[in-house]
Amino acid sequence: MSKKKKILPELRFPMFTKDKEWAYLYGNELFEPISNKSHNSDLPVLAITQDQGAVPREMINYTVIASKQSIASYKVVEIGDFIISLRSFQGGIEYSLYKGICSPAYTILRKKIKIEDVFFKHYFKTDLFIRHLNKNLEGIRDGKMVSYKHFSEILLPKPSALEQQKIASSLSLLDELIASHNAKLVILKKHEKALMRNMFPQEHQSKPDLRFPEFQGSKDWNEIPFNQAFQRVTRKNIKNNQNLLTISAQQGLINQEEYFNKKIASKDVTNYYLIMEGEFAYNKSYSKDYPMGAIKVLKEYDKGVLSTLYICFKCQDGFNKSYFEHYFESGVFNVEIDKIAQEGARDHGLLNVSVVDFFKTLIVKVPPSKKEAEKIISCFSALCELIIAQREKIERLQIHKKGLIQGLFPKIEI
């Protein structure tokens, strides 16, 4: 007779409030391991990811070269299967919406009895389940993997089929809503990128491809020597400010602990550069493959510190930092930096430049009138606000989903 625990979640749909308490079954009572290698290597190879589950590798531009002999040993994954990945202790068990093959290093789980797949898809990603998965797994971070034996010892919830379906349906609808807002965010960012590509002059251009109607007959844009528009900032961090910054593609200059989402051991940063809000920074050894502009402005904090690997600078009087924030973000200036990048750096895809060349050789392009610059600033500022609002909306939905999951599944420590 299977050992069962009965308990109720905090949130329950009205039609189930009078139903029985939830039953709990061991993992091996609900799922069995599958190791089917009967394939002709003609199925898509699946990547097992923590954010998208099991998906064909080409969908996420994930390339791993494997020999035909190696692929022949891969296991077949059916739609609706679950996969215990090498990092399951960290992100739960993954679900597959695709038929394909995966490395024999993974354990494939298939349901033994009739259950709602999507109900368990959500449950296997909860913090509660991951905590259960991590119990008694000493040394897992040294390379050990969650085994089927260990999974078999975990008690899993099994409400009625109808309640499973209702929970799965509600969470899936929320996932679809989040996905639609993510798609909208992608469109907004693509629109922003397209505008940036066309509203600033590219290499060898004296004017942009796209210009507001009232400026279409205006003069060519001006080319300004970099050291005329900016002055270098080299103030030392004598008060040992600990707001150590790094460059993020999406967030600009951001505190390192916020960026990496973990505590970083303190270090002596008294010789680092102190940078103030509204000032810019460029990493002298940054990659030319940086997706957007490699120069970022500090706007999240009133001050911070940067390694001396960075070139820090601020606008000269009479030049608008808001304009240059968007100008640098467009990436057009990366082409200029590439022209003076040191030869050895180019071989490694880096834009390593000397400080002297940076200030004496580079030029920036600005509109012939302040009104045109202000119109560009207004356009991109409004678009940035839309993108920020969209990100915040997605974040609120994700928080709502997390809270809903915590209420829909019983909080029990087994």
Image (spheres, rainbow, N blue to C red):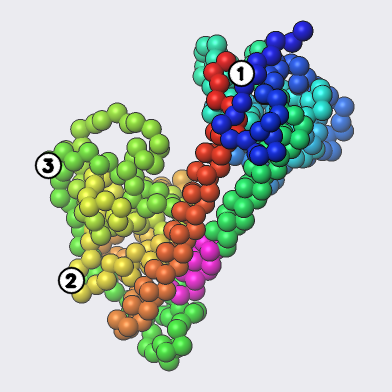
Residue at the spot of label 2: 317
Q: What is the CA distance from the residue labelled 3 to the residue labelled 2?
A: 26 Å
**Residue 403, position in %: x, y?**
52, 38
**Residue 150, position in %: x, y?**
64, 13
Q: Is residue 49 magenta?
A: no
Q: What is the CA distance from the residue labelled 3 to the residue labelled 1?
A: 48 Å
Which secondary structure is most common in the magenta stretch?
helix
Number of numbered discs on residues: 3
Mark 2 residue element: loop
Q: Which residues are magenta?
A: 188-200
Label 2 vs 1, first from the N-terminus: 1
State the residue in front, 347 or 143: 143
Give the numbered dot on residue 145. 1
Q: What is the CA distance from the residue labelled 2 to the residue labelled 1?
A: 59 Å
Q: Which quadrant of the view contains residue 7? A: top right
Check disc 2: other Cα within 10 Å, few if <14, some if 14-19, many if 20+: few
Q: Is residue 241 visible?
A: yes
Q: Is residue 198 magenta?
A: yes
Residue at the spot of label 3: 238
State the residue in front, 12 or 221: 12
